[in-house]
Image (cartoon, helix red, strand yellow):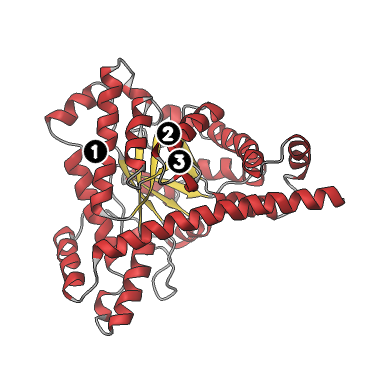
Amino acid sequence: MRTPLHALAEHGQSAWVDYLSRRFIRDGDLARLVERGLAGVTSNPTIFQGAIAEGDFYDDQLRDLLAAESDPKEVFLAIAREDIRAACDTLREVFDHDQDNLGGWVSLEVDPNLANDTRATIAEVSRLHQMIDRPNLFVKIPGTLAGLPAIEESIARGIPVNVTLLFSLERHRAAGKAYLRGLRRLRDNGGDLRSVASVASFFVSRVDTEADRRLDAIGGHDELKGTLAIANAKLAYQSYKELFSGPEWEELAAAGATPQRCLWASTSTKNPQYRDVRYVEELIGPQTVNTMTRETLDDFQDHGHVADTLEQGVDEARGRLDRFAAVGVDYDDVTAVLEREGVDKFAASFQQLFDEITHKREQLIRS
């Protein structure tokens, strides 16, 4: 049966879901979505926190783990290891048969509290890579200034990387250059470039949320509302095409390298006045990924429209950034604020996760 997700694939875009829990895997929901065209999974601490809190599904494992381990982070990683491995195994056939290196991946996030510590991030990436021990694992590294050398080093060590929390065109380009440096080092050291891959998770809807807030503060200019995020993403795709082309790239590609594809993240619509699947429908194009929340995925399967939209209106997108500058919205400040808030929000989610594990421990002791 042809589904909207299959239609996306026909247009060159890989559909992933930003959702993972043990129930999702064991009840067969993940496998059924894979049959309908789903090609990847991303996870984050908020998702794990909700999965642990939602009932008693993890209680037996938690009881065993907490009997021997008091550090909630180590308890979480033991839980995550089982779920991430199971998801990787469910998607392994997709991974093995995907010639473009866009399908079959599962992402696990580095502790965001390390986002500004390069050495600690590198060590944590290696640890997670070894812990999961699956070829179709992406380790998520924040695209902060401290994260850039960690991206390069991890790729040079042969570890696939999902660069997350990218908001600005400048930082997106820097992440691509870090990936290229890592590929060159891996090649020069005799490594197999076919063993690594990377995606650049470029966040979308949050850009409109922040830009619209600033437009409201200025007053007027309603015609600009809800337009910056999509323009920003379309320009990021143009930057991707420039970075991964030309003789130097072709030399790496001939050795087995694949480009660092754009992954559209934060594609759920925050403003109820906007169409609920607009950040999917308006960013469809070849060699890209769209990672959706479970709700957005269901909405798109229900009423999404598929067409090649990513390269429509590129000149208009360039002019759009100039128009925001002209009315007093500072693009660089918007993206800098979003990066800081993104790191803080992810760190807060980790803390909520650890608090939930501690709360569960107290519940299990009393029961």
Q: Earlier in the sequence, mark 2 or mark 3?
A: 3
Give amino acid for label 3: Ala
- Residues marked 3 and 1 touching at CB (< 8 Å): no
Q: Position of residue 198 (x, y in %)?
A: 35, 36
Left or right: 326 with respect to 30? left
Can the viewer see residue 303? yes
Residue on which disc 3 sits: 39
Report helix, strand or loop for mark 2. helix
Q: Residue at x 25, y 44 (%)?
A: 174
Q: Position of residue 249 (x, y in %)?
A: 18, 31
Q: Earlier in the sequence, mark 3 or mark 1?
A: 3
Give the Cα separation between the discs numbered 1 and 2: 17 Å
Compared to residue 94, the image places residue 165 above or below, namely: below
329 and 322: which one is in front?
329
The image quarter in which residue 314 lies: bottom left
Q: Residue at x 16, y 74 (%)?
A: 326
Compared to residue 86, the image places residue 318 above or below, namely: below
Residue on which disc 2 sits: 122
Can the viewer see residue 259? no
Residue on which disc 1 sits: 177
Alpha-carbon neighbours of circle 3 within 10 Å: few (<14), some, or many (≥20)? many
Give amino acid for label 2: Ile
Alpha-carbon neighbours of circle 2 within 10 Å: few (<14), some, or many (≥20)? many
Q: Earlier in the sequence, mark 1 or mark 2?
A: 2
Q: Residue at x 44, y 41 (%)?
A: 140
Give amino acid for label 1: Lys
The image quarter in which residue 342 lies: bottom left
Report helix, strand or loop for mark 1. helix
Q: Residue at x 37, y 28 (%)?
A: 196
Q: Position of residue 216 (x, y in %)?
A: 33, 81
